[in-house]
Amino acid sequence: MQEKEVTDAATPELIWLNYTPSRIAELLDGTHWANSLSWNQLVHLGVYFKAYEAPKGAVIFKEGQVERSMGIIVSGQVDITKADQQLKATVLARLRAGQTFGEMSLIDDEPRSATAVAASDAVILSITKDNFLRLSREMPPLAFAVLWKVSRQLSQRLRRASGQLVDYLGGNQ
């Protein structure tokens, strides 16, 4: 996640919060995402994550952007939107505290498949692919635990999308 470029004075920007690893651990501990991790593991993760405040309307990342990071919502809400051929954005999901987004960019080298926008004032923790790879070299078991959580989240979303696709296709035949 990067602070966005200034393109429109009316669009708020992400604000980097210069938090210590312990403060980031506290934020992670307050999310259900971290429920299976120990306090010691959370403090170690705090070294690799950065915290951001995303005012309502802030674009966290844009569809098509080649930027590699995953976010965890600490507070607030984030909309995931996708543009159609006429560039009309459709909200695919509204994510809440404890949920992750942008996970695919930690795994593949493809451009962002959707846009993430703060639907309300939000606090987000972000880990870049570079920091995740550094974590995997320095603390492989902890990196595996994070990757396992990411994989489970992606699997659950794929199952949900498959069910929605079947419902959609079944209703149009």
Image (tube, rainbow, N blue to C red):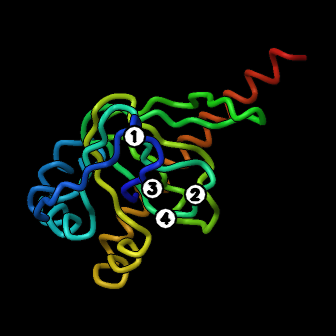
**Residue 149: x %, y % from top left:** 40, 55
Q: Residues within 10 Å of mark 2 (few under 14, many from 20)?
A: few
Per the model, the C-alpha gap separating discs 2 and 3 is 20 Å
Q: Which mark is residue 9?
A: 1
Q: Which mark is residue 150?
A: 3
Labels 1, 2: front one:
1
Per the model, the C-alpha gap separating discs 4 and 3 is 14 Å
Labels 4, 3: front one:
4
For label 1, the SS is: loop
Q: Residues within 10 Å of mark 1 (few under 14, many from 20)?
A: few
Q: Is residue 57 or residue 98 the one in the foreground?
A: 57
Location of residue 123 (image quadrant):
top left
Labels 3, 1: front one:
1
Q: Which residue is mark 4?
A: 68
Amino acid, disc 1: Ala
Q: Is residue 35 above or below residue 24?
A: above
Location of residue 111 (image quadrant):
bottom right
For label 4, the SS is: loop
